[in-house]
Amino acid sequence: MEEYFNEHTPVYELERFRAAFEFMKENAAPGSTCMDIGCGAGNVLEYVKNELSFSVSGMDFAENYVAQAAKRCGCEILKGSILDTAFIDGIKKQYDFVLMGAILHHLVGKTRTGSEELARSAVRNALKLLKKGGHLVIIENAYSPAFPMDVIFYVKRFMTGFSNRRVSFLNGWNNIGAPVISFYTDEKLRRMIPAEIVKDESIDYPDLSPVWKLAGIKKASWVTYICKKS
């Protein structure tokens, strides 16, 4: 997967982080700190640093992203995976806020069950990076029902056995090739979080594409969960 993201650098719109930014601004104190897990090219970190006046750090497992984010933000960017418990335990600093934007669905195992356990492990490791009373922000796509996402997961796993490239279907966003993804329902995502959810927001997609409807998807949402470490 690192090879894929070294070649493909999607940048998520800041609007997807609006609820998180509002909460962070309302609950920040002078000198507040933030770690962005899977920081990508660094556009979110750049906003948090310049517009919210946080002290920021980031991490990503893709060398290309680490270089881009460090150059863009002028801050510490660690190279490593949120699934590497030894790496996470080696980070001695703890933060007021930890961000995980569109990360969990990229943590894939051989099965959907295995992928879910990886996502749970990532959330547990992210909570380790928080100060007591700090907040973890998880932002994800949520789809229901679950069965079509099961099918898409295994189709993409099959296709990536032949090629590590995207395989577009009708248009560029309908991709049955790399990367393999494991999307979840809102209910499933909530059960992955072993901490109090103090705020959440769900924004439904205004229109499902004909392809998604054909696949059996009834609802698609952009969800935000803000969790407090006790």
Image (tube, rainbow, N blue to C red):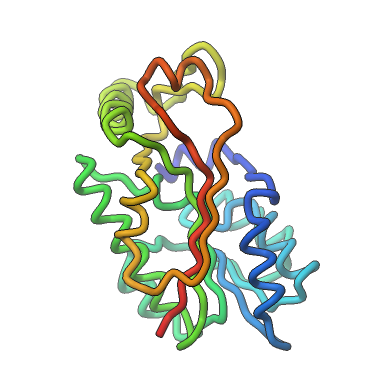
The quarter of the picture where the N terminus appears is top left
Left or right: residue 201 compared with residue 43: left
Residue 48: x and y, percent? 71, 67
Left or right: residue 180 compared with residue 113: right
Q: Quadrant of residue 44?
A: bottom right
User: Relative to 141, does residue 31 appear above or below in the rendering?
Assistant: below
The front one of 184 and 165 is: 184
Q: Give the residue at x 56% y 16%.
A: 171
Residue 79: x and y, percent? 49, 63
The front one of 140 and 36 is: 140
The quarter of the picture where the C terminus appears is bottom left
Q: Give the residue at x 72% y 59%.
A: 71
User: Relative to 160, does residue 14 appear above or below in the rendering?
Assistant: below
Left or right: residue 39 compared with residue 146: right
Residue 64: x and y, percent? 57, 49
Residue 20: x and y, percent? 62, 63
Q: Give the residue at x 37% y 36%.
A: 144
Q: Quadrant of residue 128?
A: bottom left
Numbered-mark total:
0
Could you tell me if residue 37 is visible in this image?
Answer: no
Q: Give the residue at x 69% y 66%.
A: 22
Could you tell me if residue 124 is visible in this image?
Answer: yes
